Every structure is written in C-alpha cells, then in structure tokens.
C-alpha cells in the first residue's frame, strides 16, 4: 500500500483528527476529505494488517460501498458475489435468494486486509493524510474542550496535533473514549465467544448461518477461493478454539456442512475471540465524537459489525459537514447523529443480546431472526433515503 503523506509535525492544524484507520475511521475520513476538510488519520497498526472480523457485509453495507465508488475495487480483487443466504435452526432450513433491491444485487464478504486497504487508499486519494504505526497518548484540552491530541509517531517522535474535532474510531478498547471518559448508556448482559479459520476447497452456497443453543456456526465465502468457517458458543465451550473445536460445533448444528468440511482443506491455524459484552456509549462531546466499535459494539453473532461501521461513518460525516464552523451548530449536529445511531441500533442491540444469551429454544430463535431482519430492513430504508444527498 502506497500512501502519499507528509511527515507528522507538532502544532500542525487540521479540521478533523481521526484516531483509527480501519473501516469506520477510514470511511469517515474519506467522506470528510471529499468535502474539502483537512483530515489526518492516526492508526496504531501496520498498513494492510489483518483484523479479527466476521467479514460479512449486509445489504446496507454493500449499498454504502457502492454509493461511495469503492465497491468496484472489492469486486476486482476477486471477492465472490453472494446471492443466497441459508438459515438452519430448529427443524427448519430456510433458503433466501437475494433479490435485486436498493441497487444491490449481491452481497460480499471481503478479507479485512482488502476492505481496510481499499478504504484507506480511497481516503488518501480524497486528500486525507493517513499515518500508520502512530498512537495517541492523550487528548489536548482547552477551556474544557478537546482541541487536539498528543501522538507518538512510527519513528517514536511525540507530536501535538490540533483540530476543532477529534474522532475516535479506534475500536472496543478506544483510547479516545477512555481519555474523554465517554459514559456507557447501554451494556449488554451476555457475550459469546467464537473461533474461526479459513478452509480451502470447500463448496459453498452463499452465507450459511446455523443457530443451535451453545452451538452456532456459519460459512462465509471470502477471497482467494477460501471460506471463513466459524463456531460461536459460550466462552466455556469455545475455550482456546481450534480446527477440531470448530468441526465439532459445526457437526452439532449441521451434519451436512460438517461433511463438506471433512472433505475440504482445513487451515493450519485459527483465531479465537474470547467474547466481550456489547455496549452503546455516549458518542459526542465538546470537540470529540466516536464512531464504529469505539461508540457502539454488539456481539459478532449478528455478523453486522462492518455494516454498522459503514452506516455510522456516513451518519457522522454528514453531521460534521452540517455543523462544522460553529461550536453550537456542531454540538447540535453531533447530538442528532447520536440520536439517529441509537434509534437504528437499539432494536438490533437488544435482539442480538438475546441471541448471545444462548437461552432460547427452537421456537424462540425463529422469532428473534425475524426481528433481526426487520431491524436491518429499517436501517436499509433509512440509508437508501440518503442517496439523493450523498456526502461526496
């Protein structure tokens, strides 16, 4: 990945500092830079590095990427189109063929090494500076307002950067959220753990989701002819994860998928997520805002986190553009952003927490999945209605 950026220097002034250059941060920076704002992105990871992820994009997420003009790069990289979703639960096997709607005729599940890089390059082309291996040590305050950050560069220099707005897009362990002491407004009661790996030579038929109490699993076709296969259950059952554990849980929920796994080429290693309770934080204050997992996180069993990140990047970018230049106008716009995010997120948040509890029977899960679909449709309708006034 080649980024054309000047070195970071102390006392540099920007309109917006974005801390975190993954999906939410890179997308927000891209949208703001396209509107002519001076934006710098600081990300502590290496350029092009991988990240724990479910990969799957829902229709609303694909709509965003298409509207922003970056979906073509995802497709050109060989990301397979997904036109079918299968839900297995109770005695049901429900197959849903994707119908073209809202300008979307296929779903995609790109590897994070691809998706993050595409968005970072798009942000850089729009004019945003993107600096990897740069971490934030503290925020700078003036008269009770955040006015910048102190950061450590990749060559271990400490620089102070100034901006009227600092956006935290730095994940569930957000430094910005911690430094501004952003309070939680909602905390989930339950958390699932998961383990996943990439199988090769595995015949797939779109997204495949299996819901069994303490034995959920799924298959997600992704890049390079591979499929991400995951198992999700209570932390005690997942333990350290691994290929055998994934195969055991898949077999408990879907013998048919388990047989396909047996014939496929397993990965040499897997990744394991020990679980984290979902939350919604207050996501705006004097001189700061949060986006992505920094402000809102729910259990990954929904496979909706990336779509959330893209949605909230657009909502936040629109708010910043609307209010920038006047402190009171910006505060009002950021409060509206948070209200809209919460209105769209709470139905999903509550349903996913119930699924993560593992305390449902075969009758319950069908109703929960219908509710989840309805909440996603409401979100999609709202995003589609924004198309006539894009941030670009």
Image (tube, helix red, strand yellow):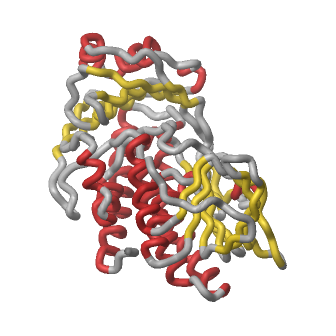
- Would residue 226 appear left or right of 267 to someone viewing this image? left
Q: Position of residue 320 (x, y in %)?
A: 54, 77
Residue 57, above or below 39: above
Q: Position of residue 7 (x, y in %)?
A: 63, 59
Viewer-proximal residue, 49 or 272? 49
Is 270 rendered above or below residue 39?
A: above
Q: Is residue 58 above or below residue 277?
A: below
* Quadrant of residue 244 within the rendered picture: top left
Which residue lies at the image location 56% right of the left edge and 80% below the top edge? 333
Task: Tell me residue 132's x, y (percent).
Answer: 58, 49
Q: Quadrant of residue 208?
A: top left
Residue at the image position 37 percent from the left and 26 percent from the top: 229
In this view, 85 is above or below 138: above
Question: Which residue is at the front of the view, 107 or 112?
Answer: 112
- Residue 73 placed where, x, y %? 29, 52
- Residue at image position (43%, 40%) is 113
Relative depth, front residue between 235 and 15? 15
Q: Residue at x 38, y 43 (%)?
A: 114
Q: Is residue 340 left or right of residue 209?
A: right
The answer to whether residue 265 is seen in the rendering is yes
Of all residues shown, which one is farthest toward the right? 143
């Amino acid at each position: 990945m080649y980024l054309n950026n000047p070195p970071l220097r102390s006392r540099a002034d920007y309109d917006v500092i974005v801390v975190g250059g993954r999906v939410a941060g890179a997308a927000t920076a891209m949208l703001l830079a396209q509107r002519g704002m001076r934006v710098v992105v600081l990300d502590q990871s290496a350029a092009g590095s991988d990240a724990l992820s479910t990969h799957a994009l829902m229709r609303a997420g694909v709509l965003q990427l298409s509207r922003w003009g970056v979906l073509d790069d995802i497709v050109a990289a060989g990301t397979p189109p997904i036109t079918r979703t299968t839900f297995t639960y109770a005695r049901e096997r429900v197959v849903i063929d994707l119908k073209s709607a809202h300008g979307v005729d296929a779903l995609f599940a790109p590897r994070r090494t691809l998706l993050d890089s595409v968005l970072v390059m798009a942000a850089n082309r729009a004019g945003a500076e993107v600096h990897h291996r740069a971490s934030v040590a503290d925020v700078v305050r003036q008269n009770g307002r955040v006015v910048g950050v102190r950061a450590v560069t990749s060559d271990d220099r400490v620089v102070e950067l100034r901006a009227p707005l600092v956006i935290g897009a730095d994940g569930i362990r957000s430094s910005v959220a911690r430094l501004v002491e952003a309070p939680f407004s909602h905390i989930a009661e339950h958390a699932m753990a998961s383990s996943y790996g990439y199988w090769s030579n595995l015949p797939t038929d779109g997204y495949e989701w299996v819901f069994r109490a303490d034995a959920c699993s799924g298959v997600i076709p992704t890049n390079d002819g591979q499929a991400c296969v995951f198992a999700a259950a209570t932390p005690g059952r997942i333990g350290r994860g691994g290929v055998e554990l994934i195969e055991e849980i898949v077999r408990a929920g879907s013998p048919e998928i388990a047989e396909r796994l047996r014939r496929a080429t397993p990965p040499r290693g897997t990744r394991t997520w020990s679980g984290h309770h979902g939350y919604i934080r207050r996501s705006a204050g004097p001189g700061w805002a949060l986006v992505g997992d920094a402000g809102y996180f729910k259990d990954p069993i929904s496979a909706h986190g990336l779509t959330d990140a893209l949605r909230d990047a657009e909502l936040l970018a629109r708010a910043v553009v609307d209010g920038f230049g006047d402190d009171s106008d910006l505060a009002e716009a950021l409060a509206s952003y948070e209200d809209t995010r919460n209105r769209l997120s709470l139905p999903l948040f509550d349903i996913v927490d119930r699924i993560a509890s593992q305390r449902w029977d075969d009758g319950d899960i069908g109703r929960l999945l219908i509710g989840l679909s309805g909440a996603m449709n409401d979100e999609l309708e709202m995003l589609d209605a924004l198309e006539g006034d894009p941030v670009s």
